[in-house]
Structure formats: C-alpha cells, structure tokens
Amino acid sequence: GAVVSQHPSWVICKSGTSVKIECRSLDFQATTMFWYRQFPKQSLMLMATSNEGSKATYEQGVEKDKFLINHASLTLSTLTVTSAHPEDSSFYICSARDRGSSYEQYFGPGTRLTVT
Amino acid sequence: QKEVEQDPGPLSVPEGAIVSLNCTYSNSAFQYFMWYRQYSRKGPELLMYTYSSGNKEDGRFTAQVDKSSKYISLFIRDSQPSDSATYLCARTNFGNEKLTFGTGTRLTIIP
C-alpha cells in the first residue's frame, strides 16, 4: 500500500526558533499534499494544501508567514514552523494524494512538536 | 453548526460486542464519506469509504450512509481489543480534495 513518512517523529525546540518537518510519499507520486494540526483529544484541522511546484493554499486563520510550506517535488513537502511559540505545540500530520486517486489521502505517522 | 458532528465518547464495550459509531453532517453536497482509525500518537488510516446511500461491508466493518437523514455509521462486529482507537468520520465533495473530519470517537474494547 501507499506509504507516507514524516521526519522527525518528535521534536522539542525553544521558543523563537524554527523547526522543519518533512513529509515524503515513499512509493507513489503525490501531486497534492496536505498539512493538518491536531491538538490533544481534538480532530484534525487542515492547515494548508500544497501542490507540487506551486504555492500552498492556506486555510482561513492559518498564518502563511509562520507556517512555511514547500512542495518541491512529487514526493516531498516540508512544513517550517518559524519563530515557534509554546502555543504552536501540537501534533502535525501530513497526507498525500496519489495522482491517480480522486479522493483518497494517505496519512503520515505525525510529528509531535513541543515548544518550550 | 459544525459541518460534521461526531460524539467524542469515550465509548467502552466488552470484547465481542457490536460497536456502532455515528456521525451527522450538514451539507447535502457531500459526496464521499470515509471512516479513519487513529491509534494514539499515530496518523489516521483509512478503513472504509463510500459515496452512496446504503451499506458497504468489509470484513468485520460495515459503513452505512443515509443521505436523506445526513447520517453515517460504522459498525464493528466481533470487536477485538486491537480495535481500541479513535475513529474519525470524514467527508469530501466530488472534485474537492479537502477532507473535513469529525471530532473522533475514542473506543475501548475491554478484554
């Protein structure tokens, strides 16, 4: 089956620093990747949609200058949390859509970010 | 009103019982409905999807959609401790890539 990986799986950083999270589709080409945030005991909230080679589309209320998304290839998208603050601590999950699928998204295992 | 409403639980049932998980949605334009399972500190995995009213069965899992009532359900037969997880319903529109998730229901199967 389709596999999506994320790196790192867990990261702790100090307030004010930046953190980069990678999302890779391992055995398929992903024209579209999605970034979600999930707070404890809450559902996944879509942050942005990124298409390979073009700028990401951010959901309302998500600061694009704070959450930088780059989708440089059909197998890699990165999310950089800039100037992180404790309120950015969350579980970040990416998903990727196989170019042959009209609806199915394959999810990565998630990255737990803790900002101290 | 949230687009997808789901009882957050938690729900605890004994092993072997039939589990019923439910969601309601508000937008009648929704076309595809999915159920995802998420283990603690892991990403969601797709269990089932459907796009029409009626039942769809896959092993111990049955997804049911009632578009007239805007109601979707997931039934788990012969529940196992390994079924203990959070179950998320989701929907999307045909041609729209975005998924909208319910809040998830935490399920515990008691051995």
Image (cartoon, rainbow, N blue to C red):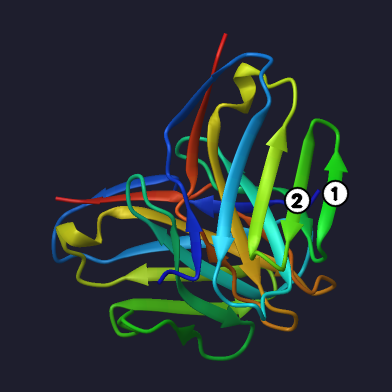
- The residue carrying mark 1 is B56
Give the CA distance from mark 2 to mark 1.
6 Å
Q: Dot 2: within a 10 Å radius of its alpha carbon, few (fewer than 14), some, or many (20 or more) residues?
A: many
Reading the image, the residue beneath label 2 is B64
Residue B43 in the image: state x and y as whole percent.
55, 47
Q: Which residue is at the far bottom?
A: A54
The amino acid type found where label 2 is placed reads Gln
The picture quadrant where one finds residue A18 is: bottom left
**Is B66 above or below relative to B104?**
below
Identity of the residue drawn at 16% across and 57% down: A86
Amino acid bearing label 1: Lys
Q: Earlier in the sequence, mark 2 or mark 1?
A: 1
SS of the residue at dot 1? Answer: strand
Relative height, residue A100 to residue B72 (above, below): below
Residue A2 shown left or right of residue B107 in the figure: right
Q: Are marks 2 and 1 in contact (CB under 8 Å)?
A: yes
Residue B55 screen position, x and y as percent: 83, 50
